[in-house]
Image (spheres, rainbow, N blue to C red):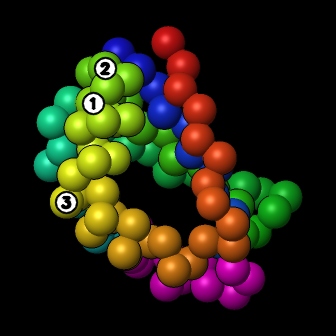
Amino acid sequence: MILELARIDIKEDTNQEFEAALEIAKGVISQSKGFQSIKVKKCIEQNNRYILLIEWDTLEDHTTGFRESEFFKEWRALIGPFFLEPPLVQHYI
């Protein structure tokens, strides 16, 4: 199992819209091969920061399988417009 940690900073005052889009996006990513689970946490100190904790079977299921799929394009189309900057993504074992 691989844990993807994605830190996402969104544009100010878009939390409600981002969270609604993210609920839809969760349904998209969950269809990807190797996907296990997703948890979303909102930062207390910085209102526009979130972390996504996503579990994958393998690193390649995320970096190749998901990232090179139509699911990723749909995922990014839903939540990407809210990004203040590109997410910081790291993987853990």
Q: Which residue is mark 3?
A: 70
Alpha carbon distance from label 3 to label 2: 19 Å
Q: In this rendering, is residue 90 above or below 10?
A: above
How far across and down, in percent of the image, does residue 55 sit?
37, 30
Considering only order in the chain, which callout, 1 or 3, is on the residue closer to the N terminus? 1
The answer to whether mark 1 and mark 2 are in CB contact below 8 A is yes
Q: Secondary structure at mark 3?
A: helix
How far across and down, in percent of the image, does residue 91 sit?
53, 26
How far across and down, in percent of the image, does residue 27 sit?
22, 59
Residue 84 relative to residue 1: left or right? right
Residue stretch in magenta: 11-22
Residue 15 painted magenta: yes
In this view of the protein, which residue sits in the foreground, 35 or 76? 76
- The image quadrant of residue 43 is bottom right
Q: Which residue is mark 1?
A: 61
In this view of the protein, which residue sits in the foreground, 23 or 35? 35
Dominant SS in magenta? helix
At 65% from the left and 47% from the top, the residue drawn is 88
At 56% from the left and 78% from the top, the residue drawn is 82
Q: Secondary structure at mark 1?
A: helix
Between circles 3 and 2, the one closer to the viewer is: 3
Amino acid type, callout 1: Asp
Considering only order in the chain, which callout, 2 or 3, is on the residue closer to the N terminus? 2
Q: Quadrant of the N terminus?
A: top left
Residue 27 relative to residue 41: left or right? left
Alpha carbon distance from label 1 to label 2: 5 Å
Amino acid type, callout 3: Glu
Q: Residues within 10 Å of mark 3 (few under 14, many from 20)?
A: few
